[in-house]
Amino acid sequence: MRSHISVEDVPSSRIFLIPVLNAMEDSKKIEITYQSFYNATATTFVVEPWGLKLHHQRWYMVGHSPAIGKTLVYGLDRIKEFSMTDETFKTPEDFDCDKWFEDMFGVNSYAPDFNHKPQDIEIHVSCGQIDYILSKPLHRSQRLVGEDSTGYILSMYLVPSYDFIMELMKYGAEIEVVKPIELREIFIRNIEEMNKRYGLLTESGSSCD
């Protein structure tokens, strides 16, 4: 039966997922050597593994760093070395992984244009894409709030991070940002940059009828 089922590969689960799960279960601090995609060198530090999240075929760890007093997200595929220490920790009783990510798209809350804060967002979705997005919502806060002859209006409340912007961009002309205006302007700038590469293309919306 196994040969009849195909699932997406999750490379980041191959090496460190089970060790992190064991450390969480035993409430043991871990020492990791970590190199993000944005740094040329790796750093080694101790972290308390509080939670795990799977997003777009990558596992991420919510970890509290006692040295800097911050709780951050670490991609398991960016861990170079791992060891479990003998030092224990206690996860805060009010920590809930789902709530920790509730205002984010995926795991990223980096949005300097919005002070990294969640925003009330509305998008217009074409008739051809609405069923896909309703069946697999972009975010847990997504709501259908209106419609017109060419599509539907969805609202949501989240941090408009780079990852979220790229998720909307992949739908091309099938999605239009209605508000906030600052997010709409980011899309306009992106489209202008694309026009420089590909030339100006004009399309008109189609009716739902």
Image (cartoon, rainbow, N blue to C red):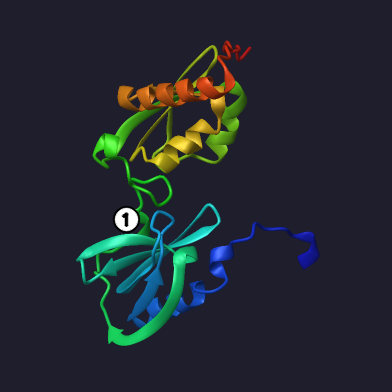
**Which residue: 41% across, 45% down?**
105
Tell me: residue 48, above or below residue 176. below
| Image x and y of residue 72, in percent | 31, 60
Tell me: residue 50, above or below residue 150. below
**Which residue: 28% across, 67% down?**
64
Tell me: residue 49, above or below residue 136. below
The front one of 201 and 120 is 201
For residue 189, what is the image quadrant? Answer: top left
Residue 144 in sight from this viewpoint: yes
Q: In which quadrant will I find the N terminus?
A: bottom right
| Image x and y of residue 58, in percent | 51, 58
Residue bearing the label numbered 1 = 100
**Which residue: 25% across, 69% down?**
93
| Image x and y of residue 63, in percent | 33, 67
- The secondary element bearing badge 1 is classed as helix
| Image x and y of residue 174, in percent | 56, 24
